[in-house]
Image (spheres, rainbow, N blue to C red):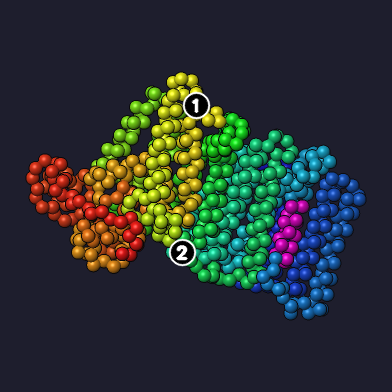
Amino acid sequence: MVGAPVDGTFALLGLIAAVMVGVNLYFLLRLLPRRGGPPDLASVILVVGLFVGSLGLWGAVIYAAQSPGTASFTAVLIAGNSMMAVAGAWLIALFLRAEERHLTPHRWTWPVLLAALLLGNELLMGVAFVLLGATPAPAVGTEGVVALLATAVDSVWFTAAMVANMVALLVWLPIDRAVRSPLLALAATVLVVPWALADPIVGALAMAAGMTVAFVLLFSAVGGPSAVSARRLRVAVAVAAGFAAMAAGFVASLLAPPGPFAAVPFAVANLGVMAVESVWLLRWTLDGAPADDGPTLPLFRRPAATTAFLAFGFVAEWLMAAGLLLAINGPDALAVGGGGGPVGLVATGIEQVALVTATPYFLGLMGLEMGALVVARMRRATERPQRVRLGLALGTYGVYTVLAPAAIGTWALLPGAWPNVGALGPVSALTVPAIVASYALFVGLAFLFGRRSYCSVLCPSAVMYGGEFSQKLIPATRESPVARHHVLGGRWRGLALGLAVGSWVTLAAVVALSVWDSTYGGTFLPAGFDPSVLYAAGIWNTLWYGFFLTIPYVGMSPSRNWGFCTTGTLLGAVGALGFYRKEALDRDVCRACVTRECGQACEVGLVDMPAALARDGVFRSSKCVGAHDCEVACPYGNLVSRDVRDVVRRWLHLPDRHGRPHPRTTGPLLPVVAAGIPAAAPVSAGTPANP
């Protein structure tokens, strides 16, 4: 543990620290009105004077720790007696009737000043206790002032004191619970700092746990309500950025050469996070601490802030996973080789990102955070099929995406053409049959049960897009001009169709080149990387996450809607030709419907579905992923999904599984299929949301 003394002085120093923190908190909370608002000038003068005097006292203690003797003892006495001048300044302020004057609100000067004084006191206390607790006391001239300050910031004395200050402010101030909870989780994670560098594995796991809890709370805070305020979303962005900064400092310290300066990056990051949070809390209080968050808007109506929140969240997850990778496997775990030049730099960067995103650490963190939102949605789901589908998605994500890589050590054993995020291995003549067999299996399932058998169950997108937060972004597909022009509706169009074809051409090319390389000795190695490995790193393990970040601008489910996913487009085409379709139990109900809620609830933007159901009673689309949201949204319970099970039940003269008896039919299976599935008339992909 950084900064912990090695002898019996720990208890004494801890008692002194607790008393000093308690005194600071007492005066700080006395200064700040319980319900917010600017305090009177007399109180401000008193608290500022006490903090300044305390700075002098800790400076004298540091001097005494470095130069023990009569002179240093005298300096401590002088510093302590000088604090009596604070009482005189306060009396003068009262005499000048300063208690009748208040600070001017909406200014940064006082919050920054108070936060700086508070941080300065706790930092100097940390420095003093590091010097007093170490045996023998380190010489500042030898280690350097910077190294000593970094050790103090990463010590238990500074972090515990600052966490106590932040927790007290969060409890004292009338902050919305949805904002207070993630801020408390951030403060709790700061407590791990002293252990993170002393025992990186334990520290990384503890930091990851704190970050996971905080992000679940953040996603719930901004994705739970139907609308969110700008203040709440800004806090979410700031907390996500704070975790990203802490994780970046942790990774930088793990990569730094061993020595007294290795802790500096982590210390700078932690100091910055605590300083920003302290300033924000003080500014928010002095501004009046309004009980409400101000005007609210739906999440998709704040695209810039929403994208910033998602981006900082992804960076924080990536850096935290990188920290786990380094702590467990050593500093060489992030080493990536590659060629020079611009192409080599880009390829190396892609591989560097993919090296972390393909690990069970990253996939596990993402699964825990997004999975918690899926569980919350399952608890609110009213229909059993939706709960079952979401439960299957969680289970297969855990087994297929996280546990399988952990069991075999790495997905690098699987070729990059494999239909799964995380696969990073080259293709050879021996693995081609296995790849073809896996695609054949998924094609067969899609023909029988629709595209949902993969896209809404086995694909990691089912978890990423299935939680409450992502569901709030569904209207972005109808609101975004880009999405309305290119992907809205049941048919592939223009740019999206071109991207789908280009993805298949690229996949075929990289597979062929990778097989050639494995057979004839590496003829085609762009920037030194196997083509299939580079493709998988760029598409599945880098851009795949970029798709998620672009939802506010390009619409929901971009990896499905824009044709980047080769597996999804193949299974969609097969599913549209197979047994799966949407069916209206009563076509007249759809004809009379004016709300068109089924089309508005569709996460891939199938807004032409209501018109097709009203016209034909059935709807098919290669873009349908079978998420079941349209059926849940139907206020009349008139929409159901049909697949091979319904055909078999008709063939066996069994009752309809949706409660409506089938007419008796005879003959073999395929004629029954042909007679039982009416052909859908062509529909326009540009049909508006409410035709």
- For the C terminus, the quadrant is bottom left
* Mark 1 or mark 2, earlier in chain: 2
Q: Is residue 110 magenta?
A: yes
Helix, strand or loop at label 1? It is loop
Read off the residue under disc 2.
Answer: 298
Cα distance in 3D space between marks 1 and 2? 49 Å
User: Which region shows up in magenta?
Assistant: 109-124
Comparing 505 with 115, the one in front is 505
Given the image, on which type of amino acid does mark 2 rest?
Pro
Q: Relative to residue 175, is residue 404 drawn left or right?
A: left
Q: Is residue 372 visible?
A: yes
- Residue at 32% from the left image edge and 53% from the top image edge: 490
Q: Is residue 185 visible?
A: no
Figure check: 326 above or below 558: above
Residue 125 position within the rendered picture, expressed as x and y whole percent measured from the top left:
75, 52
- Residue at 88% from the left image edge and 54% from the top image edge: 75
Q: Which of label 1 and label 2 is nearer to you?
A: 1
Comparing 375 with 499, the one in front is 499
Residue 671 position within the rendered picture, expressed as x and y whole percent measured from the top left:
13, 43
Residue 524: which numbered mark, if any?
1
Residue 660 position within the rendered picture, expressed as x and y whole percent measured from the top left:
16, 56
Figure check: 507 above or below 244: above
Helix, strand or loop at label 2? It is loop
Given the image, on which type of amino acid does mark 1 rest?
Phe
Q: Main secondary structure of the magenta part?
A: helix
Residue 6 position within the rendered picture, expressed as x and y whole percent measured from the top left:
72, 40
